[in-house]
Image: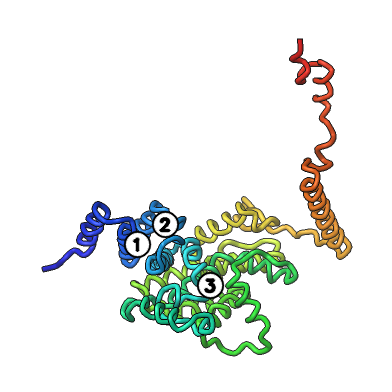
């Protein structure tokens, strides 16, 4: 007899919600959300976690409930990656990967870096809380989903960083740390580990070699642990083609006066409609301020930007720093005097007219 596991879990959780205490209700909800995320029902699992508002009170729960919450969040992040929701995947897995304590937070082992921070009794308690091996979530899959999702989201920031190395653009701390370590290498050997593969793919994407980036990312063995590996690889290939197009235009647009849509479609093996859609989104987001569509030819016309001289760049930097200094001084003055700074000391002209009983001011109400 075939048993509908989802229906059985639905009945059991409904019973717990009706009769049990608050801790049991919380744990039942987390297990229910984990079950939905495990079977790729992303929207149901995400809505259950958001509507429960557990993220606001989970810090006051016991350690075992917090571990269950971490496992549910990680599984939701993996489900988001499966559906191509890379922003939600990066948001769900960011804290887990950034803390570099995945084993402890998921109760799948002990971190060797923290052996000196706990005594024998604490270590014994942590070992008791560990989940069985058959319930482990692959840490390699978690890190692969987070790094690849972050890479796909921050291609424009990587292009801006390469164009101006001295400019510190806001990006993921984990990705920036890996990029800085990779760029400090004197000799870049062939990639062996997961992080090296992702960093190599990032540089290949920025260099316009999107085929190599696709081969590097899709060859990761972590995708075999997804529920549908061929679908995941096909989805990554399509997204990397689009991000390769964006990176190519952001990096090499200044070298062109006009770019044909057919040429871009042939280069990145995309349809002309898809190329037109991607470029139009870039124009709407002001990522290509010097470009516009040429109506008669249907090509992308790129106008050369006026390059600032060294003196002009220094002048702009000086003006920005002076404005920041003035604002910081005004804030310091406000904190000491309780006022609103010099810029609010001048009374507006309509206030003076009103004080004299003229039209339109507060003084006109007298009488």
Circle number at residue 54: 2
Mark 2 Cα-neighbour bin, 10 Å: few <14, some 14–19, many ≥20? some
Q: Position of residue 244 (x, y in %)?
A: 56, 69
What is the residue that sits farthest to the right in this orientation? 311
Residue 310 coordinates in the image, percent (x, y):
86, 65
Q: Above or below — where is 97 with respect to 344?
A: below
Q: Secondary structure at mark 2?
A: helix
Q: CA distance from mark 1 to mark 3?
A: 22 Å
Badges 2 and 1: C-beta atoms under 8 Å apart? yes
Lower sequence index among marks 2 and 1: 1
> Is 166 in front, or is 63?
63
Q: Which sits earlier in the primary sequence, circle 1 or circle 3?
A: 1
Residue 266: which quarter of the image? Answer: bottom right
Picture mark count: 3
Q: Helix or strand or loop: what does disc 1 sit on?
A: helix
Res 197 seen here: no
- Foreground pick, 317 / 130: 130
For the point 43% across and 76% down, the residue is 141
Q: CA distance from mark 2 to mark 3?
A: 20 Å
Question: Which corner quadrant of the image does residue 174 belong to?
Answer: bottom right
Comes first in the chain, label 2 or label 3:
2
Q: Residues within 10 Å of mark 3 (few under 14, many from 20)?
A: few
Number of the label disc, if any, that sits on residue 326 = none
The residue shown at (44%, 60%) is 60
Q: What label does residue 30 carry, if any?
A: 1
User: What residue does disc 3 label?
Assistant: 99
Residue 47 in the image, given as x and y percentages of width and height: 38, 54
């Amino acid at each position: 007899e075939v048993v509908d596991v989802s229906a059985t879990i639905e009945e059991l959780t409904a019973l717990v919600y009706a009769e049990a205490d608050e801790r049991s209700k919380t744990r039942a909800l987390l297990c229910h959300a984990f079950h939905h995320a495990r079977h790729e029902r992303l929207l149901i699992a995400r809505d259950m976690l958001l509507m429960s508002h557990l993220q606001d009170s989970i810090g006051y729960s016991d350690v075992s409930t917090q571990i269950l919450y971490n496992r549910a969040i990680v599984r939701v992040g993996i489900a988001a990656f499966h559906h191509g929701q890379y922003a939600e995947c990066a948001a769900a897995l960011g804290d887990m990967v950034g803390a570099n304590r995945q084993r402890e937070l998921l109760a799948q082992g002990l971190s060797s870096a923290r052996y000196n921070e706990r005594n024998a009794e604490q270590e014994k308690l942590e070992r008791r809380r560990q989940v069985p091996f058959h319930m482990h979530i692959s840490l390699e899959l978690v890190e692969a989903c987070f790094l690849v999702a972050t890479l796909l989201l921050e291609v424009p920031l990587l292009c801006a960083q390469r164009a101006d190395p001295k400019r510190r653009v806001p990006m993921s701390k984990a990705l920036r740390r890996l990029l800085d370590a990779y760029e400090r290498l004197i000799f870049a050997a062939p990639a062996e580990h997961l992080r090296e593969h992702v960093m190599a793919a990032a540089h290949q994407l920025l260099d316009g070699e999107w085929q190599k980036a696709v081969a590097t990312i899709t060859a990761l063995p972590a995708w075999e642990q997804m529920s549908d590996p061929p679908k995941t690889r096909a989805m990554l290939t399509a997204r990397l083609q689009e991000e390769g197009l964006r990176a190519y235009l952001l990096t090499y647009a200044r070298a062109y006066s006009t770019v044909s849509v057919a040429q871009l479609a042939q280069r990145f093996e995309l349809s002309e409609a898809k190329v037109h859609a991607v470029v139009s989104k870039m124009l709407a987001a002001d990522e290509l301020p010097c470009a516009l569509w040429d109506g008669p030819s249907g090509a992308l016309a790129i106008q050369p930007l006026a390059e600032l001289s060294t003196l002009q760049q220094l002048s702009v930097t000086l003006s920005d720093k002076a404005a920041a200094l003035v604002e910081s001084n005004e804030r310091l003055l406000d904190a000491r005097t309780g006022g609103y700074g010099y810029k609010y000391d001048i009374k507006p002209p309509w206030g003076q007219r009103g004080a004299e009983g003229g039209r339109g001011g507060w003084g006109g109400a007298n009488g």
